């Protein structure tokens, strides 16, 4: 259903598989875990390529080889699995087809005047504004849709008013579009499982009465990358979505990424969050001091939580992680933007599970970071925007034996950075600078003959630096930038 040469995010594909019913439940596993198993089998059989992996070795994006793509197109036509619009030298639409891909060179005539009673899935790849002229078609001509994906239609600015007629819809994405509002009829989509609003212009979830009727929602994605967002002295680089109320009724919710606390809005937000005991991923921003206390209590109830993203409302807010006395035992990914009182000892209790840690504006000193040296399973570590305010960073022999990515960015007081031989032995990427107080070069040494990719920020000058057998030096960057894109990618 995807164009030739098109790389597909693994998470997107898996959620669409689930929505269409391709993934069969296995006791003791989530549908997502089962689907990941399907994907791994396809990769192992060389039917699918995985050009990009995350730090744990899992596929982030996937695609099929050109030759296999042609074979798939031919086979899907034979069995009526999918129809591509338009297709040269063929009628616009003919016969029974369960899935429809609307390509960039299709026209409105391909859609108008047709009824698609058997189509379960529609993916739109058109980039022209005239698509908005046929938006009503998606609410009237596709009665049995399960998947409606507009992610690759950036000029789309509205959804059909009667989208609620698609009673069987399970997956709806307006990611990257110009859509500003969700139609009121969305409350009728009682089978909806995934709602993807990322990088759209939708900044508020529906009202409480609507949320109550969407009880089957498993995933809400609402992150918007916006490097101009400022919060009382520091830049987020992203904004969340406001919750009017009713989020607590979504008992099946597994991913909520991410929401923004309205300091003058719903005072029951954290009480409602406490009901979401099935959450695996939680992202929340604009968190104040009292909010933090309430959030800690909520997180302790989320026993299945794997990823936690929290950003404070101002630099004056201090996150006391010790208030979270019983954190979820499956935590793998922690992202904290805000002043930390200290690094809690329970971090070491999670050393077998925690693989990714990002800290920003934390104002930690040297003795605080020593706790992190015991995190032997960390694969990705970011210390950015004065998360560390010491003058010296020294990575000693044996520390972080599994670390593959290290980001050290915008550390205004750092004067010296030393990486000893046999430290960071698995490192693949370094993101360094700027360090305005540093008067000497970054020094490192190691034994292996591999390669390390060194990225000097902000000019993103990428080059390969051979590991040197004895000692080597890397020049740091000389201006300011932040690489926030990676944190916004889903699994």
Image (cartoon, rainbow, N blue to C red):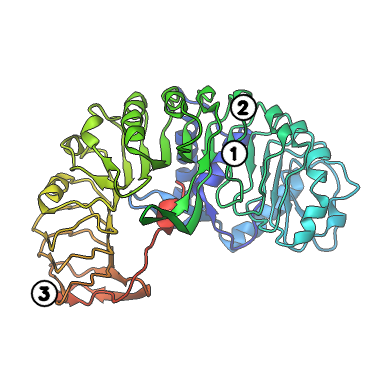
Q: Looking at the rendered structure, which numbered label has been put on residue 214? A: 2
- Mark positioned earlier in the residue sequence (3 or 2): 2
Q: Quadrant of residue 161?
A: top right
Q: Quadrant of residue 417?
A: bottom left
Identify the residue shown where x is 44% and y is 35%: 33
Taking the image as drawn, is residue 373 in sight? yes
Residue 109 x %, y %: 87, 56
Dot 3 and dot 2 residues touching (CB under 8 Å): no
Q: Residues within 10 Å of mark 3 (few under 14, many from 20)?
A: some
Is label 1 or label 3 in front?
A: 1
Residue 289 position within the rendered picture, expressed as x and y whole percent measured from the top left:
32, 37
Left or right side of 52 for 468: left
Instruction: Say which mark, if any, is on residue 195.
Output: 1
Q: Determine whether, in the image, residue 315 is placed left or right of residue 29.
A: left
Q: Position of residue 121 (x, y in %)?
A: 70, 41
**SS category of the residue bearing label 3:** loop
User: Which residue appears at 15% of the width and 76% of the height?
Assistant: 472
The residue shown at (48%, 38%) is 262
Position of residue 229 measured from the top left corner of the image (x, y, whole percent): 46, 56
Q: CA distance from mark 2 to mark 1?
A: 10 Å
Label 2 Cα crowd, 10 Å radius (few <14 / some 14-19 / many 20+):
many
Task: Estimate the spatial distance between the alpha carbons at disc 1 and disc 3, rounded to whole Å.
Answer: 51 Å
The furthest residue to the right: 113
Of residue 374 and residue 292, the one placed in the foreground of this image is 292
Whether residue 91 is visible to the viewer of this picture, yes or no, is no
**Residue at (42% x, 40% y) in the render:** 284
State the mark number for residue 471: 3
Furthest residue toward front: 264
Q: Secondary structure at mark 2?
A: loop
Cα separation between marks 3 and 2: 59 Å
Choose between 218 and 282: the one closer to the eye.
282
């Amino acid at each position: 259903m995807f164009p030739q040469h098109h790389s597909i995010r693994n998470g997107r594909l898996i959620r669409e598989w689930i929505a269409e019913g391709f993934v069969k439940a296995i006791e003791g596993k989530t549908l997502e875990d089962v689907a990941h198993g399907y994907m791994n089998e396809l990769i192992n059989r060389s039917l699918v390529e995985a050009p990009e992996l995350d730090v744990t070795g899992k596929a982030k994006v996937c695609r099929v080889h050109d030759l296999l793509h042609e074979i798939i197109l031919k086979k899907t036509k034979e069995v009526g699995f999918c129809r591509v619009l338009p297709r040269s030298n063929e009628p616009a639409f003919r016969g029974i087809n369960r899935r429809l891909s609307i390509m960039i060179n299709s026209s409105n005539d391909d859609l108008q005047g047709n009824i698609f009673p058997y189509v379960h899935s529609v993916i739109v790849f058109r980039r022209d504004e005239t698509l908005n002229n046929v938006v009503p078609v998606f609410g009237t001509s596709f009665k049995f849709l399960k998947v409606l994906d507009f992610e690759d239609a950036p000029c789309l600015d509205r959804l059909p008013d009667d989208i609620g007629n698609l009673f069987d819809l399970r997956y709806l994405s307006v990611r990257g579009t110009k859509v500003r509002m969700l139609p009121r009829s969305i409350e009728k989509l009682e089978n909806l499982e995934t709602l993807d609003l990322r990088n759209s212009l939708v900044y508020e979830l529906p009202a409480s009465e609507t949320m109550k009727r969407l009880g089957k929602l498993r995933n809400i994605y609402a992150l918007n990358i916006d490097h101009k967002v400022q919060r009382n002295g520091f830049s987020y680089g992203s904004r969340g979505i406001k919750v009017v109320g009713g989020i607590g009724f979504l008992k099946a919710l597994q991913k909520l990424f991410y929401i923004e606390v309205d300091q003058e809005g719903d005072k029951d937000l954290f009480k409602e969050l406490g009901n979401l005991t099935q959450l695996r991923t939680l992202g929340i921003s604009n968190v104040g001091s009292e909010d933090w206390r309430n959030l800690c209590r909520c997180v302790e109830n989320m026993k299945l939580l794997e990823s936690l993203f929290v950003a404070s409302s101002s630099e004056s807010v201090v996150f006391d992680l010790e208030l979270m006395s019983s954190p979820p035992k499956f935590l793998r990914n922690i992202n904290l933007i805000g002043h930390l009182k200290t690094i809690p000892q329970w971090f070491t209790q999670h050393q077998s599970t925690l693989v990714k840690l990002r800290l920003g504006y934390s104002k930690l000193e040297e003795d605080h970071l020593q706790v992190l040296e015991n995190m032997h399973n960390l694969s990705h570590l970011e210390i950015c925007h004065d998360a560390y305010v010491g003058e010296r960073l020294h990575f000693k022999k044996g520390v972080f034996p599994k670390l593959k990515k290290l980001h050290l960015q915008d550390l205004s007081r750092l004067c010296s950075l030393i990486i000893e031989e046999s430290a960071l032995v698995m490192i693949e990427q370094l993101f360094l600078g700027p360090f305005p107080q540093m008067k000497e070069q970054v020094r490192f040494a190691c034994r292996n003959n591999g390669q390390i990719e060194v990225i000097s920020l902000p000019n993103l000058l990428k080059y390969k630096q051979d590991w040197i057998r004895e000692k080597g030096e890397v020049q740091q960057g000389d201006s300011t930038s932040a690489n926030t894109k990676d944190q916004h990618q889903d699994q």
